[in-house]
């Protein structure tokens, strides 16, 4: 019986061969699927008349190459120090700064940078392997108004000064459907307070999602916490003459994970103060979950 453990650069399968004199090649044969998938190798360790096997499985070569290359990209920042208040200096202009949160492959950062050369765009995500795709595209296209920041979204306050960001886009984030994970939804009040700390006055938050649950939740939050809803649609592509940036499609949009066949859109701005109604919000969500119904706005 074995145990699979994931480490930064190796997946390690550890198992026990009950008989010390067992042919090690039989274990190799029995675990051939692991070898086929991981392309690794075995190490057998005798201990107390038993033999442990350790299977070392290297991380995908492509992923390792991307991690190495992205460190050399001049427009990619991985947990940088002293960047708050310095983004206009990096871009060498005073153009508005727009963030794409949980950017994944950075489709919106790349697409909007091409559409609006008079704005600066920064894709934010913790997954460097995905971010590499967008970062490479902006380099190949010569887009000097696009950059990428690798960090957790919860740490935005360390990398942006108050009022340094003009708009925020949240495109197809994980809707975190369980009520117990509601605080991880990127339109939850705990994130709104974070956005408030870096957004310039009049700055907007744009949500684009295929999840009707996240859309309804965001409308509930807007109603409870006094956000201004500038625009909303439960089927944005059914609307004629939408803004060019709303035509940009992400990889996750194409997957249609929610199976809704509709794309929902919200444009919101924050109030002067975000009240503490989080317990009340959680109570509504819990009651809704227990009743088996949907949030009603």
Image (cartoon, helix red, strand yellow):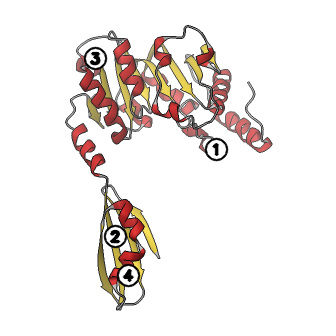
Indicate the position of residue 100 as horizontal and vertical percent values. 42, 26
| Numbered badge on residue 88 | 3
User: Does 96 appear above or below 182?
Assistant: above
Residue 26 tag number: 4
Residue pointed to by mark 1: 178
Distance between mark 4 and mark 2 Cα atoms: 14 Å
Q: Which of labels 2 and 3 is toward the front?
A: 2
Residue at 30 percent of width and 65 percent of height: 40
Disc nearest the viewer among 3 and 1? 1
Which residue is pictured at 36% across the width and 32% down the height?
158
Q: Tag 3, which secondary structure?
A: helix
Q: Compared to 152, does 97 lie above or below?
A: above
Q: Element at badge 2?
A: strand
Badge 3 local density, few (<14 within 10 Å), some, or many (20+)? some
| Residue 197 drawn at (x, y percent) | 45, 24
Pointer 4 with pointer 3, Cβ within 8 A: no
**Left or right position of 76 against 253:** left
Residue at the location (34% across, 86% down)? 23
Q: Seen from this angle, which residue lies furthest right?
A: 291
């Amino acid at each position: 019986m074995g145990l699979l453990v994931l480490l930064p650069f190796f997946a390690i399968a550890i198992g026990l061969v009950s008989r010390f004199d067992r042919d090690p090649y039989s274990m190799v044969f029995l675990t051939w699927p692991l070898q086929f998938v991981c392309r690794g190798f075995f190490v057998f360790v005798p201990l107390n008349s038993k033999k442990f096997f350790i299977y070392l499985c290297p991380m995908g070569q492509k992923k390792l190459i991307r991690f190495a290359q992205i460190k050399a990209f001049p427009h990619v920042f991985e947990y940088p120090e002293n960047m708050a208040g310095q983004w206009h200096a990096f871009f060498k202009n005073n153009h508005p700064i727009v963030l794409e949160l949980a950017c994944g492959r950075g489709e919106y950062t790349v697409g909007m940078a091409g559409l609006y050369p008079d704005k600066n765009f920064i894709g934010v995500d913790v997954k460097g392997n995905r971010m590499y795709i967008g970062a490479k595209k902006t380099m190949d296209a010569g887009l000097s108004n696009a950059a990428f920041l690798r960090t957790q979204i919860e740490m935005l306050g360390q990398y942006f000064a108050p009022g340094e960001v003009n708009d925020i886009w949240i495109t197809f984030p994980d809707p975190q459907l369980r009520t117990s994970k509601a605080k991880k939804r990127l339109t939850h009040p705990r994130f709104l307070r974070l956005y408030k700390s870096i957004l310039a006055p009049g700055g907007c938050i744009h949500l684009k999602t295929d999840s009707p649950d996240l859309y309804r939740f965001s409308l509930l939050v807007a109603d409870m916490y006094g956000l201004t809803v500038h625009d909303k649609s439960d089927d944005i592509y059914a609307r004629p003459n939408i803004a060019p940036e709303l035509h940009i499609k992400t990889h996750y949009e194409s997957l249609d994970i929610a199976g809704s066949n509709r794309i929902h859109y919200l444009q919101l701005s924050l109030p002067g103060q975000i009240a503490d109604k989080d317990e009340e919000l959680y109570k509504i969500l819990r009651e809704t979950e227990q009743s088996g119904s949907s949030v009603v706005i």
